[in-house]
Amino acid sequence: MSLLDMTCRPVRGGVLVTVSGELDATNTHRLASTIRDAHRPGHSLILDLSGLAFMDSSGLHVLLRAHDDVRDQGGTLHLAAVRDIPARILQITGVWDALNIHADVDEAVMAVRDAQADRRSDDAERL
């Protein structure tokens, strides 16, 4: 039995990865691999963490690495529904304010759609 479960599905402008269970040094490689496989350059990535009950510092490292990797490939990482221990870790390390964190998945999806619309508008103005 795995303590970490993940599912992926496309959303307009990116991919939604739903993460549940516990994220620690024994399984962070699985999340990192899922993120690498799911993300497409130029698109956003949303991580739904509503089902994530526990995260240690190795989980924090994976999130920060994902943030940098997605940004370097022209996208944006969005975290949705961060609760309990994972939220506390992001807050006490000062990372909370540096990431795109949303109250729920719907809010994150809207942020991705709005950013995509803004990019289209900027592209149209350049023409």
Image (tube, grey):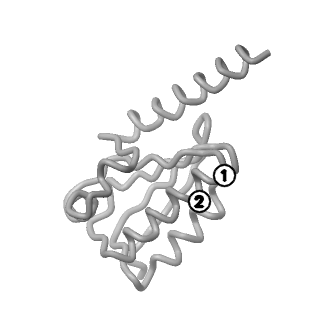
Q: What residue lies at 41% left-to-right and 82% top-to-bottom?
A: 1
Q: Amino acid at mark 2?
A: Asp
User: Is disc 2 placed on a helix, strand or loop?
Assistant: helix
20, 70: nearer the viewer: 70
Q: Quadrant of the C terminus?
A: top right
Q: What residue lies at 39% left-to-right and 71% top-to-bottom?
A: 59
In this view, 56 is above or below 72 = below
Left or right for 11, reference 51: right
Quadrant of res 113:
top right
Q: Which residue is mark 2?
A: 69
Characterize the local packing of mark 1: few (<14), some (14-19) or many (20 or more) Cα atoms within 10 angstroms.
some
- Residue 73's mark? 1
Quadrant of res 92:
bottom left
34, 9: nearer the viewer: 34
Is the Cβ of the residue at disc 1 closer than 8 Å to that at disc 2? yes
Q: Position of residue 41 (x, y in %)?
A: 70, 50
Q: Amino acid at mark 1?
A: Gln
User: Is disc 1 placed on a helix, strand or loop?
Assistant: loop
